[in-house]
Amino acid sequence: MTMVVSTERVEQEFGADTPPRCEVPEHERFVLGTRSLHTGGGFDRSRDYTDLSIPLTGPVRLSGVRAGDRIRVDLHGIDIAERGALVTLPGRGAVPGLGTSGHSVPIKDGYVEFGDGVRIPVHPMVGKIGVGVPGEAPGSSTVGVHGGNLDCKELTAGASIFLTAQTDGAALYAGDLHACQGDGESSLTGVEVEGAVTLSWHRAAPTGSDRPLVLSADGRLLTIGDGDTLAEAVQAALDDLLALTADAFGWTRERAAMFLSIAADVGICQLVNARLSAKAAVDVAHFAGTPHASWLTRAQP
């Protein structure tokens, strides 16, 4: 029987010392329910939306994991509700001069009905996923080596994320589902939606960096960087992808950099939180025949 973790209790931090909701063995699937802006009627009652939050579900203890272990979390499915919401707030997001506004949208037949005949294809994704951090726990809306509020739109069903456990048992959290989101999430939110995500995990070989790494459902390898500025976030993502590429092929940094310049894409995950996140992506197919090919495999449906 698949273990299901409800939203009866939720968290606002990626804490390592929070009592676990459950313990899950390697390779066993489990489901995390997730809250959102519409949960409990909060969005409809709110006057200015500043009283709303999008929390985490967890933590889930991963059996036998020790601090420093590299783990791979596979996303097998994302189920979303039939209504989502977006907000803008003064001084938040990357678009200056916005006022307070909220917009509730129906989700029907694979589309977000935005209004005035505009329909956007649904692309369900996980916005927040990460492991617990000992000591002063990072809030749910920041990013770092633990993962966090990555807002990487490639975190869909069929994708995988590699994380480094910061504590024994890992203390895995997830939340913040989006029906769809553009790169950057520029006005503060995607289509925020309630739902559930089906996951499994297993131990992974070292990938050359402790930062998050994503394998997308369409066969791309993405390194995720974060920083106080977008330049810092991009640099971190590129550094990781360059090191991984040089190691895979035995190339010099210069040769690896030339390859990335013609084969890799640099993008923005989110630019709306205190720490920004960026990504560098390259097709997994390039690594066929290298030692890394053994772990660059897609998640099972």
Image: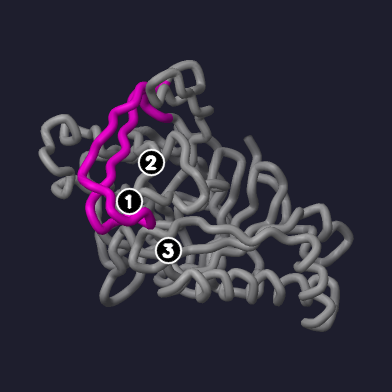
In the rendered image of this protein, does residue 2 appear above or below residue 258?
A: above
Q: Quadrant of residue 96?
A: bottom left
Mark 3 / mark 2, whichever is N-terminal: 2
Q: Is residue 47 left or right of residue 231?
A: left
Q: Residue 58's mark?
A: 1
Instruction: Using the numbered discs, state the Cα–Cα distance from disc 3 to disc 2 in whole angstroms.
Output: 16 Å
Visible residue check, residue 216:
yes
Residue 91 falls within the magenta-colored stretch: yes
Mark 3 / mark 1, whichever is N-terminal: 1
Q: Which residues are magenta?
A: 80-107
Q: Residue 32's mark?
A: 2
Residue 248 falls within the magenta-colored stretch: no
Structure colour scheme: one colour
In the rendered image of this protein, does residue 154 appear above or below residue 213?
A: above
Quarter of the figure that contains the C terminus? top right
> Residue at left 48%, top 63%?
277
In the rendered image of this protein, does residue 72 appear above or below residue 274?
A: above
In the rendered image of this protein, does residue 67 appear above or below residue 13?
A: below
* Residue sitting nearer the eye, 163 or 154: 154
> Residue at left 54%, top 41%?
156
Q: Disc 2 marks which amino acid?
A: Leu
Residue 83 pos. (x, y %): 33, 25
Mark 2 / mark 1, whichever is N-terminal: 2
Cβ atoms at labels 3 and 2 below 8 Å apart: no
Q: Disc 1 marks which amino acid?
A: Gly
Cβ atoms at labels 2 and 1 below 8 Å apart: yes
Q: Is residue 89 left or right of residue 292?
A: left
